[in-house]
Amino acid sequence: MLAEINGCDLYYEVHGKESGQPIFFIHGGPGLGDCRADADTFTQLGDQYKLVFFDMRGSGRSEDKDPYTHKQWTEDIDKLREHLGFNQITIHGSSYGGFIALEYVLRYPQNVSHVLLNVTAASNEHHYLAIENALNSHLPGINHDMLKRLFNGEVASNEELKAMYSAILPLYSVNFDSVVAQKKVDSIFFHYATHNAAFHENLVQFDVRDRLKEIKAPVLVTGGKLDWVTPAIYSEEIAKNIVGAKLFIFEENGHSVIREKSEQYISILRNFLNEQNVKGEIKNVHNN
């Protein structure tokens, strides 16, 4: 369904328990991502929680209407929260969605009960390692010029963005399936202008590392040890700098831990949200 949020038609879905604590899921990849994967994966949490999935402005089925900025995207989240009548929300952000989730909780701390961060980072430093990891893969279609334009937000068209994403897609999965990958690529709503704005105008300024200590809500950070684009060291960095944060690293997975280990991931979320540690798996890791 669509709602006019801050002058932009946003696509959203609400599922789950009517009286449940609301969880807002923030998708990654502005201009590439949308809420469909999260909606497919997390529906089972609806037995206990109210689940809100939406496409950010300029992504998926939402309207292409600038500005495409972290500030605007966080304002849209908060206005959607108001539109749906929620006081406090749990916010879940994966990859680029984690950047937005971090900025949301820093801008609207009073409106957040819990923070769930997956395969993400607190600054743009991961780009250097991501480019190095991609080049070291020696995959066809990947070269320094292509990666530079992709990560600098200098993509010329939706067709070029599709070709670039197709080239790097094998990096996301431990067990890559070309048929499944092609279906995924063909299903994507490409918005190259949104991608360019995210990477050319926003990420160059993104660095909230010095503000992590301000976050007081309970935080769960998850990462994949084999993650090429947001390596696990950046998940560890977030957890170490938020007092009381809990960290879990999937040792045999990369950036696609939610898809590859969905049952385990959801179990970890449930235990965290129910304030029960998963024995031997989630630990406190913060500076004393």
Image: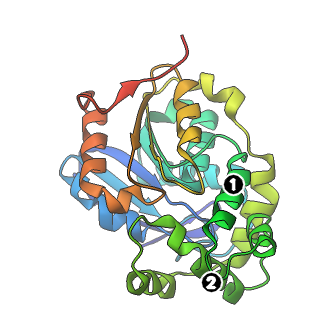
Judged by depth in the image, the label closer to the viewer, 2 or 1, is 2
User: The residue under label 1 is which amino acid type?
Assistant: Gln
Using the image as rendered, state which of residue 28 and residue 283 is in the foreground: 283
Q: Examine the image and state in which quarter residue 195 appears.
A: bottom right
Q: Is residue 230 visible?
A: yes
User: The residue under label 2 is which amino acid type?
Assistant: Lys
Instruction: Look at mark 2 in the image and give the residue it sits on.
Output: 162
Instruction: Look at mark 1 in the image and give the residue it sits on.
Output: 72
Q: Is residue 279 left or right of residue 145?
A: left
Q: Residue furthest top?
A: 288
Q: Position of residue 257 (x, y in %)?
A: 39, 55
Marks 1 and 2: in contact by CB < 8 Å?
A: no
Residue shown at 33% from the left, 31% from the top: 282
**Which mark sits nearer the N-terminus, 2 or 1?**
1
Using the image as rendered, state which of residue 180 and residue 18 is in the foreground: 180
Q: Is residue 189 left or right of residue 51?
A: right
